[in-house]
């Protein structure tokens, strides 16, 4: 979620410390692991806010339009299938702005619903859903860009 090990370790440490201080407030409405997970995610979000980058992906509207166009020549599912290498996917995730990366990771990796992503990140449901969608589109665009660059490099023998 944070894109670097040191930041992640700091966020987890902060989250666990917050949970330790607030363990008396645990009501048992959810599983303890779920409660702790949300506290740590919020600590990660706090760390992201501290180093916030612009929340806009340059060219997102163009990427979205291309992927929604039925005549677009690259099938997003095919791009994802070809990018099964976890390293490539991780690199592509790191290119996303924080708000999109967090939404995609919470939804697609951690399995939270849109409503749970909204609650965890403290945004309205519509905003959470939009961030998940835009994050996925930007992720597909980045994977497609890398795939195209890789194919061009293989054909020409020169890096793009």
Image (spheres, helix red, strand yellow):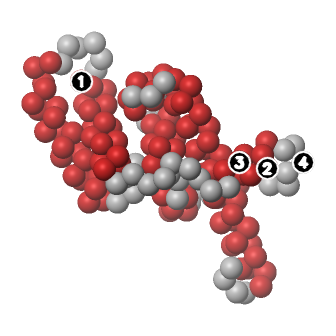
Question: From the viewer's perspective, is 37 left or right of 93?
Answer: left
Say which quarter of the image contains residue 17.
Answer: top left
Q: Residues within 10 Å of mark 1 (few under 14, many from 20)?
A: few
* Dot label at residue 32: 1
Q: Position of residue 107 (x, y in %)?
A: 50, 34
Mark nearer the viewer, 1 or 4? 4
Q: Quadrant of the C terminus?
A: bottom right
Compared to residue 141, the image places residue 41 above or below, namely above
Q: Residue at 65% across / 66% down in the picture? A: 146
- Mark 3 and mark 1: Cα distance apart in space: 40 Å
Mark nearer the viewer, 3 or 1? 3
SS assignment at label 1? helix
* Dot label at residue 61: 3
Question: From the viewer's perspective, is 50 left or right of 76?
Answer: left
Would residue 121 be seen by someone viewing this image from the given angle? yes
Look at the numbered discs 4 and 3 and tell me whether their residues touch, using CB distance below 8 Å. no
SS assignment at label 4? loop
Compared to residue 63, the image places residue 30 above or below, namely above
Compared to residue 44, the image places residue 29 above or below, namely above
The residue singled out by tag 4 in the image is 71
Mark 3 or 1, nearer chain start: 1
* Dot label at residue 66: 2
Q: Residue at 44% across / 54% down in the picture? A: 53
Q: Nearer the viewer, residue 48 or 20?
A: 48
Look at the numbered discs 3 and 1 and tell me whether their residues touch, using CB distance below 8 Å. no
Mark 1 or 4, nearer chain start: 1
């Amino acid at each position: 979620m944070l894109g670097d090990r040191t930041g992640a370790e700091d966020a987890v440490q902060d989250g666990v410390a917050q949970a330790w201080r607030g363990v008396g407030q645990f009501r048992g409405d959810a599983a303890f692991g779920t409660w702790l997970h949300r506290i740590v995610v919020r600590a990660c979000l706090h760390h992201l806010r501290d180093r916030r980058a612009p929340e806009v992906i340059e060219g997102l509207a163009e990427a979205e339009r291309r992927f929604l166009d039925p005549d677009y020549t690259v099938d997003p599912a095919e791009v994802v299938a070809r990018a099964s290498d976890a390293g490539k996917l991780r690199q592509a995730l790191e290119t996303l702005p924080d708000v999109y990366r967090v939404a995609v990771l919470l939804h697609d990796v951690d399995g939270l619903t849109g409503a749970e992503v909204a609650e965890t990140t403290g945004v309205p449901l519509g905003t959470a859903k939009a961030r998940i969608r835009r994050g996925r589109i930007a992720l597909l665009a980045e994977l497609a860009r890398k795939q195209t660059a890789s194919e061009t490099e293989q054909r020409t023998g020169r890096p793009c």
